[in-house]
Image: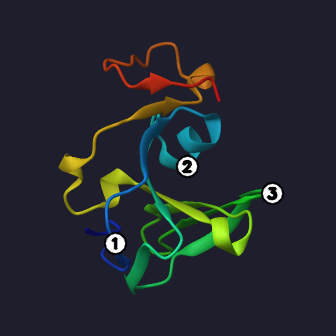
Amino acid sequence: MEGGCHCGAIRFKTAGRPFWIGACYCVDCRKISGSPYTVFAGYKKGAVEMLQGNPKEYKSSENVCRSFCPICSSPFAYVYVGTDEDSLTFIPVSVFDDPSGFKIEQHIWVSQKLPWAHIADDASQRDK
């Protein structure tokens, strides 16, 4: 599946289905997206290939590196880095060319959910 940023400077493709699809309501995800939550598709190491461009990265916490397009600022990925073997890449589903096939499987950080954001499905929920 392919996707890219708003201006087209960044293009990527993924191999296979994501191992996780979920909505995150944490403050960090709200701040970087400008929306009440972000839906991510999670991929294991080696499943995401950059086709064009280089996202700008910054370390947002001890084990997390976030990236975005340096031209249009579209978010690209949230990468959890433990060791090289267990790095995980979470891509906001809206940057895929056709995100319609993704279905939320889990809601996380619902303890930080805005009071007016309503969850209307039966996917599992976690406080953190």
Q: Residue 12: x and y, percent? A: 35, 76
Amino acid identity at mark 1: Ala
User: Which dot, 1 or 3, sits closer to the camera?
Assistant: 1
Residue linked to disc 1:
15
The N terminus - image quarter: bottom left
Residue under the point 69% across and 64% down: 81
Drawn side of residue 39 relative to residue 86, left or right? left
Residue linked to disc 3:
62
Q: In which quarter of the image is residue 59?
A: bottom right
Give the vertical position of 41 relative to 69 (above or below): above
Drawn side of residue 112 relative to residue 69, left or right? right
Name the disc covering residue 108, or none: none
User: Which dot, 1 or 2, sits closer to the camera?
Assistant: 1
Q: How far apart, in angstroms, are the residues tagged by discs 1 and 3? A: 27 Å
User: Which dot, 3 or 2, sits closer to the camera?
Assistant: 3
Earlier in the chain: of badge 3 and badge 2, it is 2
Amino acid identity at mark 3: Glu
Q: Is mark 3 on a helix, strand or loop?
A: loop
Residue under the point 35% across and 36% down: 104
Give the vertical position of 25 relative to 40 (above or below): above
Q: How crowded is mark 1: few (under 14 residues within 10 Å), some or many (20 or more)?
A: few
Q: Residue 97: x and y, percent? A: 22, 63
Drawn side of residue 23 relative to residue 4, left or right? right
Residue linked to disc 2:
32
Q: What element carries label 1?
A: loop
Q: Residues within 10 Å of mark 3 (few under 14, many from 20)?
A: few
Amino acid identity at mark 2: Ile
Q: How far apart, in angstroms, are the residues tagged by discs 1 and 2? A: 26 Å
Give the vertical position of 34 relative to 90 (above or below): above
The C terminus - image quarter: top right
Earlier in the chain: of badge 1 and badge 3, it is 1
